[in-house]
Image (cartoon, rainbow, N blue to C red):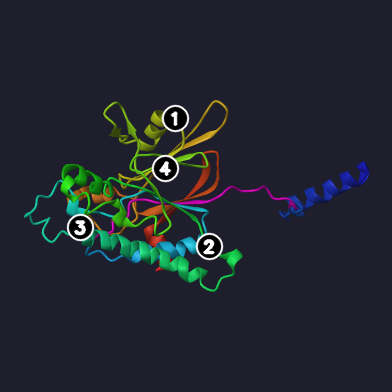
Amino acid sequence: MDKKNEIEEERIIRRGIHKLKPPPPYKRSDKKPKTGPTIMVVPDSHAKPGIPNHRYEWLGRMAVDLKPDYIVNLGDLWDMHSLNSFDKPGSKSFNGASYWKDIDVGLDGMLRFHSQLDEYNKGTKKDKKYNPELIFCMGNHEHRISKFIEAEPRFEEIISTKDLRLEELGWEEVPFLVPKKILGCSFSHYFTSGVMGRPISGIHQAASLLTKQFGTCIQGHTHTYDHSIRTDSMGKSLHGLVAGCYFEHSENWAGPANQMWRRGLSVLHNVKSGDFDVEWFSIERIKSKYS
């Protein structure tokens, strides 16, 4: 296009803009930028006797709908009330507690989740089946089993974390407080600091994760939600993410703290070298679509 025609076209566009007429659209790009993998982050879900496990079926339906490349469970799926050290045997709150009931209700939740993946893959062509990477970071509630055996070694041949049957269900089991690195992101039930190994906490917990761990960290544990982003000297984005909780019920022991908890889960899109676009799904949003 010569200069004269270019000037005339510019005048036509300007006259159109002055009349509030939209200009001609730009040509759509033929070559789109590649996006990174997706990670679904499932925070503490606390399966326990007496509480229905509908939320795990919703989770399975959501997974086959969104098809994240990774599903990371941050632990405390099994509540293990029977092994808690706060309620004494014989107390009202401990009445009826059973190790095997605790194990079974967690497995019930897991099986409900997997049933949705199996249903989707049934009859699906081999190259179209959905098989995400499944990562399970052990939480302090699952760790109660190991702590109990340490205190009561006579039960060593009777119970163990193998009762969770994570390997059989296709999950990679990550030991309690051992971070799992995926695409530059560190996942753990919680992260610690100081010589005493206390959980990182405080009103600005996500920012504290960054200042004390020096990298992108995603954790559960507190049932609250917090997200902080910082940029290093090379322009790389670092995220601290405290992921909330994935259950609807209230916990009697928590009292007013129940109101502080953010219920739902996060999906990390376009994950590259510890950076990502985070999308929050409230449990109400999940329930409205997948229940």
* Relative height, residue 110 to residue 257 (above, below): below
Question: Is residue 32 found inside the magenta-colored segment of the image?
Answer: yes
Between 96 and 164, the residue placed more toward the observer is 164
* Relative height, residue 136 to residue 121 (above, below): above
Of the two numbered discs 3 and 2 on the same chain, state the one appearing first in sequence: 3
Q: Position of residue 240 (x, y in %)?
A: 43, 38
Read off the magenta span: 29-48
**Viewport quadrant of the C terminus:** bottom left
Q: Dots 4 and 2: beta carbons under 8 Å?
A: no
Residue at x 22%, y 44% (from the top left corner): 147
Of the two numbered discs 4 and 2 on the same chain, state the one appearing first in sequence: 2
Foreground: disc 2 or disc 1: 2
Foreground: disc 3 or disc 4: 3
Quickly name the residue at label 4: 187
Quickly name the residue at label 1: 214
| Residue 184 in sight in this render | yes
Query: As shown in the figure, which amino acid type bears the numbered disc 1?
Result: Phe
Of the two numbered discs 3 and 4 on the same chain, state the one appearing first in sequence: 3
Quickly name the residue at label 2: 130
Residue at x 72%, y 55% (from the top left corner): 22
Quickly name the residue at label 3: 99
Dot 3: element: helix
* Relative height, residue 262 to residue 117 (above, below): above
Query: As shown in the figure, which amino acid type bears the numbered disc 3?
Result: Tyr
Q: Is the residue marked by circle 3 packed among few (<14), some (14-19), or many (20+) residues within 10 Å?
A: few
> Residues under labels 3 and 2: Cα distance?
33 Å
Q: Seen from this angle, which residue lies furthest bottom?
A: 123
